[in-house]
Image (tube, grey):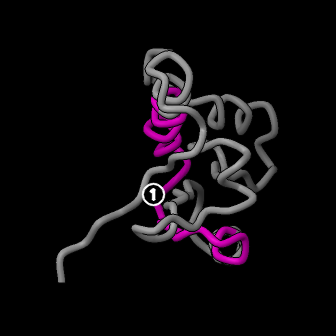
Amino acid sequence: MTGDISGAELLQREAPSALLFKAFNTTGFGNMQNPNFPQGKAVMFVAGPDGKGKQTVMQLVKDVGFEAVDAGDLPSARLLEPLAMLWIKLAFAQGLGRDFAFLLARRN
């Protein structure tokens, strides 16, 4: 993976008329079932075109229980795919296990 193009963008090339989004790829399945942590909700980034489709995906992310964060257009998937690989490396190669997620901290 070079970061020059994402898998999502490659898929978009193959299906140019499809409305495609990147989401639900930066954490493990256990967090899909329960994205709540003592520190707050796990974050789920969404990349894809603005409009009604993105609003629908953002709402789906919220409905599942994540904090939905708009990551921008589909090329932002280039950033999300390596974040998924980092989660996998931390979970398995670094021994953190699967019971962790990324959260977004904000200052008031």
> Is residue 84 one of those drawn in magenta?
yes
- In the rendered view, tell whether residue 32 sits above or below residue 98: below
Residue 83 percent coordinates (x, y): 46, 36
Report the amino acid beneath label 1: Ala
- In the rendered view, tell whether residue 19 sits above or below residue 107: above
Q: In this view, does 71 lie to the left or right of 44?
A: left
Q: Is residue 10 left or right of residue 103?
A: right
Which quadrant of the view contains residue 106? bottom left
Q: In this view, does 92 lie to the left or right of 18?
A: left
> Of helix, strand and loop, which one carries label 1?
strand
Which residue is at the front of the view, 23 or 37?
Answer: 37
The residue carrying mark 1 is 71
The span shown in magenta is 61-86
> Is residue 80 one of those drawn in magenta?
yes
For the stretch drawn in magenta, the main secondary structure is: helix
> Which residue is rendered at x = 36% and y = 63% of the image?
104
> Which residue is rendered at x = 49% and y = 23% of the image?
95
- In the rendered view, tell whether residue 102 sits above or below residue 54: above
Residue 85 percent coordinates (x, y): 52, 27
Residue 12 percent coordinates (x, y): 71, 39
Q: In which quarter of the image is the C terminus?
A: bottom left
Which quadrant of the view contains residue 59? bottom right
Q: As drawn, which residue projects farthest toward the left?
A: 107
Residue 48 percent coordinates (x, y): 59, 56
